[in-house]
Amino acid sequence: MDQSKHGLLNPEETEKLLKMVDDRNETTHAYGERFIENLYPRIKDYNLLMLKIYSLIS
């Protein structure tokens, strides 16, 4: 099923969402500076993705 026809996430966005969930889960266990340095650049993309999801459900 082509989700883009229904206004949902495309495959790239879905992958980002899954990575975001993995990163969120990792933050409960990882406290190292290296992890944060790797995570930090992705936060802006995660914010944009969450704004899109919010607009879909509101």
Image (spheres, grey):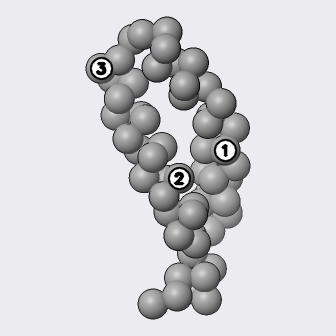
Q: Nearer the viewer, residue 16 or 52?
A: 16
Residue at figure coordinates x 61%, y 44% from the top left: 46
Inter-mark Cα distance, 3 to 2: 20 Å
Residue 6 visible (yes or no): yes
Q: Nearer the viewer, residue 26 or 55?
A: 26
**Circle 2 Cα neighbour tier, 10 Å, few/some/many (<14 / 14–19 / ≥20):** some
* Snapshot quadrant of residue 13: bottom right
Inter-mark Cα distance, 1 to 3: 22 Å
Residue 29, numbered label: 3
Residue at figure coordinates x 38%, y 41% from the top left: 22
**Residue at image mark 1:** 45
Amino acid type shown at disc 1: Asp
Between disc 2 and disc 1, whose residue precedes? 2
Secondary element at tag 2: helix
Q: Are marks 2 and 1 in contact (CB under 8 Å)?
A: yes
Amino acid type shown at disc 3: His
